[in-house]
Amino acid sequence: MPGTGKREDTGAPESGLASVGEGSYGTWLSRIPSCSPVPYVIIAAILAEPRTRRDCLSGIMRTHLSSSPPLAQHWAYTAWFLALVGTLSSLFVSEIMDLSPCVLCWYQRICLFPLVLVIGAGIARRDAALATYALPLALAGLGIAIYHNLLQLGIIPEELAPCTAGASCSEKQVEWLGFITIPLMALGAFGLISLCLIQHHRSARRGSQ
């Protein structure tokens, strides 16, 4: 009212930041593409006025946190987890169990270790083309693992082994349950990682159509 010195409250935020709704600040912010909602929650907490902050945050949390990643991302997460477990297991065998890796083991490590970073970077970027640069590494490791298993089974003669110094490529340093060897575990890891990356590629293609 005039002369009272008080401003009439019309129910609208002073700077035009309305509660979460069509055309509101919270809706605009929550529509920004992101692989993680955390940065935008922080932005909302800093920029939003106190009277609209709660609505902005709740809108962002509903938009981002309540929605699960697409199916393609689940395959990528699984591939990354397998690569991480394989890397840590390889280091455990050599550093804790003190078993020296042979030449073929080193070749497989060269293919496996970078996959943790490569797949992780693809997940962070939500890259639909992740398989195009991660799958070749996995398939190369799979091929070496198959060769290593055939060598240890005696199907490939030992004369064709590349191990001329250090640990023998044909010797079974570990044999759990009578048949589980290190090359067999590597074969399983590379096979599963390759399968996950292929499924990721197929899911990403279906999602883009």
Image (cartoon, rainbow, N blue to C red):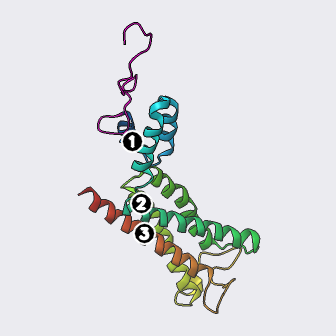
Secondary structure at numbered mark 2: helix
Along the polypeptide, which appears first: circle 3 or circle 2? 2
For disc 1, the neighbor class at 10 Å (few under 14, some 14 to 19, many from 20) is: many
Q: Amino acid at mark 1?
A: Ser
- Mark 3 to mark 1 CA distance (whole Å): 30 Å
For disc 3, the neighbor class at 10 Å (few under 14, some 14 to 19, many from 20) is: many
The residue tagged 2 is 73
Q: Nearer the viewer, residue 17 or 70?
A: 17
Q: Does the magenta segment cover residue 151?
A: no
The residue tagged 3 is 196
Q: Amino acid at mark 3?
A: Cys
* Lateral position of residue 129 relative to residue 188, left or right: left
The residue tagged 1 is 30
Secondary structure at numbered mark 1: helix
- The residue under the point 51% across, 35% down is 45
Q: Position of residue 27 (x, y in %)?
A: 35, 39
Along the polypeptide, which appears first: circle 3 or circle 1? 1
* Lateral position of residue 133 relative to residue 88, left or right: left
* Lateral position of residue 184 relative to residue 125, left or right: right
Range of residues picked out in magenta: 1-24
In the rendered image, the vertical position of residue 72 relative to residue 192, given as above or below: above
- Mark 3 to mark 2 CA distance (whole Å): 10 Å
Q: Position of residue 142 (x, y in %)?
A: 48, 73
In the rendered image, the vertical position of residue 6 relative to residue 12, given as above or below: above
For disc 2, the neighbor class at 10 Å (few under 14, some 14 to 19, many from 20) is: many
In the rendered image, the vertical position of residue 161 relative to residue 31, given as above or below: below
Q: Nearer the viewer, residue 150 or 125?
A: 125
Q: Nearer the viewer, residue 87 or 205?
A: 205
Mark 1 and mark 2 in contact? Answer it, CB < 8 Å: no
